[in-house]
Image (cartoon, rainbow, N blue to C red):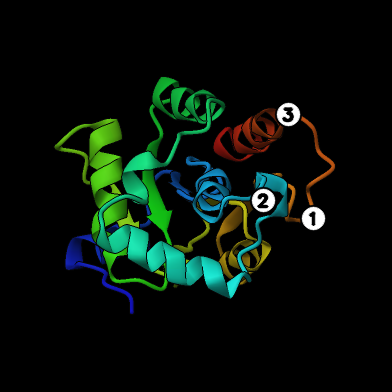
Amino acid sequence: MSILTKFQMRICIRMSSKIVFLDMDGVITNFSKRAAELMGIPESEWTKSDKNFWKKMRKSEEAGEFWPKLEIYPEAFFILDFLRDNNIEWYILTSPSLSPHAYFGKAQWLKNMFGFHFNNIIITKHKHFCAAPDRILIDDTYSKIEDFEKAGGIGILYPRRWNKNKDIKNGHEYVLQELDKHVRV
């Protein structure tokens, strides 16, 4: 289920300067590390298709233990600094997990990280609803990028071991180069 407020819908369809949407899990936060910790396996062995993980995650969320322990990727600060230094409007555009606790958990993590008044949060699995010619999505899931581009937006696939950009070293540098190309147009 997706919940977009009227304010968030206006943000998604507003046609002004560039707006950047950052995925949370896999771009800003190290979701795979936290998931692997929960499963008691090395991070390199964890996959989203592990059905046992989703059961354990739901229990962890219900106990309020999953989201608070997410770590921010250190390289995420380079992207956030670039956006701030270039006065670019940005939002976290993140998909919910299979649990209703994800909405609160993600919002709480973001408020803890960016401050109580941080409200640049859109939680929906329909990221393509926010696409427009001057909208950029940075995401680690190829299908989300593909849908966003088909809807008229600009997509940047963040290199991670599970996507087609996995061979690109220094993923944040690649993303910054791509971002710079699109915001300077």
Q: Earlier in the sequence, mark 1 or mark 2?
A: 2
Observer-nearest of 69 and 86 = 69
Q: Is residue 20 above or below residue 179?
A: below
Q: Residue at x 60, y 37 (%)?
A: 179
Upstream in sequence: badge 1 or badge 3? 1
Determine whether the residue tagged by mark 3 lies in a helix, strand or loop. loop
Relative to 132, say whether 55 is above or below: below
For disc 2, the marked residue is 157
Q: Are marks 1 and 3 in contact (CB under 8 Å)?
A: no
Q: Is residue 25 visible?
A: yes
Whether pointer 1 and pointer 2 mark residues with C-beta atoms closer than 8 Å, the reply is: yes
Q: Quadrant of residue 89?
A: top left
- The label nearer to you, 1 versus 2, is 1
**Badge 2 element:** strand
Please state the horizontal and vertical placement of residue 162, each as a whole percent of the image.
Answer: 73, 55
Give me the C-alpha separation between circle 1 and circle 3. Answer: 15 Å
The residue under label 1 is 164
At label 1, counting other C-alpha atoms closer than 10 Å, the crowd grade (few under 14, some 14-19, many 20 or more) is: some
Left or right: 141, with 137 as reference point: right
Q: In the rendered image of this protein, does residue 125 appear above or below residue 177? A: below
Residue at the spot 32% in from the left edge and 60% down from the top edge = 61
Of the residues shown, which amino acid type is indicated by label 1? Answer: Lys
Q: Earlier in the sequence, mark 3 or mark 2?
A: 2
Where is residue 7 drawn, in percent x and y?
Answer: 19, 60
Q: Secondary structure at mark 1?
A: loop
The residue type indicated by label 3 comes to: Asn
Q: Residues within 10 Å of mark 2 (few under 14, many from 20)?
A: many
Q: Residue 170 — which label?
A: 3
